[in-house]
Amino acid sequence: MLPTCQIYLSAKNTIHNMNHTIIGYEYTEDSDEPHIGSDPTIRAGTIIYNDVAIGDHFSTGHYALVRELTEIGDDVLVGTKAVIDGRTTVGSNVSLQTGVYVPSHTTIKDHVFLGPHAVLTNDPYPIRGDADLAGPKIEEHASIGANATILSDVTVGTKSFVAAGSVVVDDVPPETLAIGAPAEHRSLPEEVPQRNKL
C-alpha cells in the first residue's frame, strides 16, 4: 500500500513524484512494492526500495535512502541524507537525524535516538577479508550522540548513552555512558534521564 501523494507511474510501476522522490525502487524484477502505513511525510529526493515495510507516521528529511528488506515501525524519522541499507530492522519511535548511516544487518529497537552523522558499521575488516557482516544492536531508549561511530557486532544496551564523537568498539552495558575514542564506560550522569522522550 503506497502513501497518498501526488505521483506519476513509470513504465515499470515505480512511483515517482515531481521532486525526484522514488517510492518503490525496483532492485530486482520480482521485488514487491513497499508497504507504507498511514500519514507519511516523504520529502523531495527520498528513495525507498521495494520489499520495505514501514509503519504509520513515517517521515523523512530530503534525500533519505531506505534500501530493500528493511522493516521500520511506527513514528520513525529518517533525517536528511540519512541512509538505511537493506536487511535492517528499525523499531518504533526512532529518530535518525541528518546524515546517519545504518548498514545492513543492523537492529535498532524502540525509542532510540541517533544524532547527526552517527555512523554504524557492519564489517570488522572492510575489503580485507571474508568476514560475515554483523551490524550493531541498539537496544531500547539508547541515545547515540552526533558523529559517534559504533563498530560492527556491538550492542549498545538499554537506556545507555553514547557521547558525541565517541568510537564504540565493544558492548555498552545497559544504563551506561560510553565516552571517548575508544569509548570508556562510566555511570550515567544524574542529569541524563534514563528514557528518551521521542
Image (cartoon, rainbow, N blue to C red):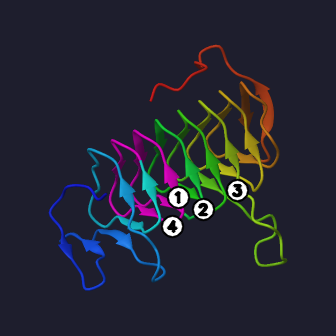
**Do residues under tags 4 and 1 come within 8 Å of each other at their CB atoms?**
yes
Q: Which residue is mark 1?
A: 70
Toward the viewer: 47 or 87? 87
- For this orientation, the residue located farthest to the bottom is 11
Say whether residue 126 is visible: yes
**Do residues under tags 1 and 2 come within 8 Å of each other at their CB atoms?**
yes
Q: Residue flagged by tag 4: what amino acid is it? A: Glu
Q: Position of residue 99 (x, y in %)?
A: 48, 57
Looking at the image, is mark 3 or mark 4 earlier in the sequence? 4
Q: Which residue is mark 2?
A: 87
Looking at the image, is mark 3 or mark 2 earlier in the sequence? 2
Task: Determine whether 184 is above or below 102 in the image.
Answer: above
- Magenta segment, which residues? 55-84
Q: Which residue is mark 3?
A: 135
Q: CA distance from mark 4 to mark 1?
A: 6 Å
Q: Position of residue 100 (x, y in %)?
A: 52, 54
Tell which tag, 3 or 4, sits nearer the viewer: 4
Task: Determine whether 79 is above or below 73 in the image.
Answer: below
SS of the residue under disc 3? loop
Task: Determine whether 118 is above or below 92 in the image.
Answer: below
Tell which tag, 3 or 2, sits nearer the viewer: 2
Q: CA distance from mark 1 to mark 2?
A: 5 Å
Q: Residue flagged by tag 3: what amino acid is it? A: Gly
Tell which tag, 3 or 1, sits nearer the viewer: 1
